[in-house]
Image (cartoon, rainbow, N blue to C red):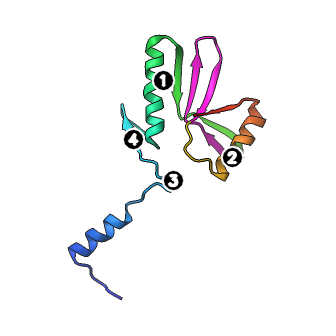
Amino acid sequence: MQEHWSIDQYKEYKEKSKRKSKYGAIKTSIDGHTFDSKKEAEYYQELKLRLQSGEIKGFCLQPIFILAPGLKYKADFIVFNSNGTSDVIDVKGFKTKEYITKKKVFEDKFNLKIKEI
């Protein structure tokens, strides 16, 4: 077993260890917020335009809902529509088993639908 690495070996190790998203999503930062994917960041920009135009009253980033003790669901957005309704939004590229389960629990508990983008 090698006890010491050369600088080049360490640099190679660090490059290999940079974690990539399991599903190919690229983290993107806008306005000081880091989004899990470019798609989510683009939706955020769309919401800002909709807010400026008066189409929506507002929106909230990454609200957390308590589903049960020790079980949380973090949506991507809540959008507050001009007509007084609101939408819970999840920007999805891939639906994991964990997401599908939490979605079902959320919708049953709160009697709300998650709108997937």
Residue type at tag 2: Ile
Crowd around label 3: few <14 · some 14–19 · many ≥20 (10 Å) = few
- Decide: marks 1, 3 in contact (CB < 8 A)? no
Q: Earlier in the sequence, mark 2 or mark 1?
A: 1
Q: Main secondary structure of the magenta part?
A: strand
Give the residue drawn at x 22%, y 78%.
Answer: 6
Residue type at tag 3: Tyr
Could you tell me which quadrant the C terminus lies in?
top right
Residue 69, horizontal then vertical, whole percent: 71, 46
Instruction: Return the residue at label 1.
Output: 47
On screen, residue 78 versus residue 14, left or right, reads right
On screen, residue 29 versus residue 70, left or right, reads left
Does residue 67 lie above or below 54 as drawn?
below
Between 69 and 77, which is closer to the camera in this rendering? 77
Between 4 and 37, which is closer to the camera in this rendering? 37
Instruction: Return the residue at label 3.
Output: 23
The span picked out in magenta is 70-90
Give the residue drawn at x 22%, y 73%.
Answer: 8
Q: Earlier in the sequence, mark 4 or mark 3?
A: 3
